[in-house]
Image (cartoon, grey):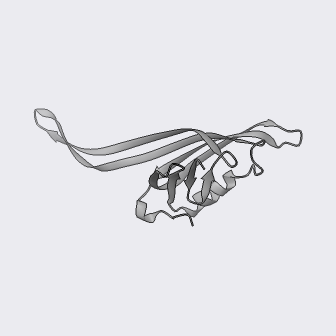
Amino acid sequence: MMMSFGTFVFALSTAAYDSLQRQMDWRHASSARVGARPARQYVGPGEDTITLQGLISAELTDNLDVLDDLRELANQGKPQALVEGTGRVYGGYVLVSLAETRKEFFSDGTPRLIEFQLQLERDEDNNAEVAA
């Protein structure tokens, strides 16, 4: 297991990602001051976004429709627990976008490769569904 998102498991046999990018922001309110630069005040954490890019190979999986499982989780609209295979817990995230590209087709139209990119955004930890 590389990572789990709720009940979905990223692995070579399902959907293996080859890059993980994380972007975090912190919010600072700005107040104008006469004759000086604006004053800034830290008001809390901002967005926390994780982007995964990967590949699904017909030679490594029996199910080329595994991305449908991710779409079902996204359709629930609930944050899901994001946990790395190392045990690192990222917290609760929602799936906000999923793109796929099907390539190198067999004669019946089945793709040999499916490239995917998905974007997850952090939500409150106490709302995350824990995989059973």
Q: Is 40 left or right of 73, judged from the image as shown?
A: left
Q: Position of residue 24 (x, y in %)?
A: 39, 43
Q: Residue at x 77, y 43 (%)?
A: 58
Q: Is 84 left or right of 47, judged from the image as shown?
A: right
Location of residue 103 by image quarter: top right
Q: Residue at x 73, y 52 (%)?
A: 65
Q: Position of residue 83 (x, y in %)?
A: 51, 53
Q: Nearer the viewer, residue 35 or 84?
A: 84
Q: Position of residue 109 (x, y in %)?
A: 84, 42
Q: Is 67 left or right of 97, judged from the image as shown?
A: right
Question: Where the C terminus falls, by quadrant?
Answer: bottom right
Q: Residue at x 10, y 32 (%)?
A: 35
Q: Position of residue 28 (x, y in %)?
A: 26, 44
Farthest residue toward the front? 86
Farthest residue toward the bottom? 132
Up/down of 87 relative to 102, above or below: below
Q: How many marks?
A: 0
Q: Nearer the viewer, residue 110 or 55?
A: 55
Location of residue 55 by image quarter: top right
Q: Is 59 left or right of 6, judged from the image as shown?
A: right
Q: Residue at x 56, y 59 (%)?
A: 6
Farthest residue toward the right? 107
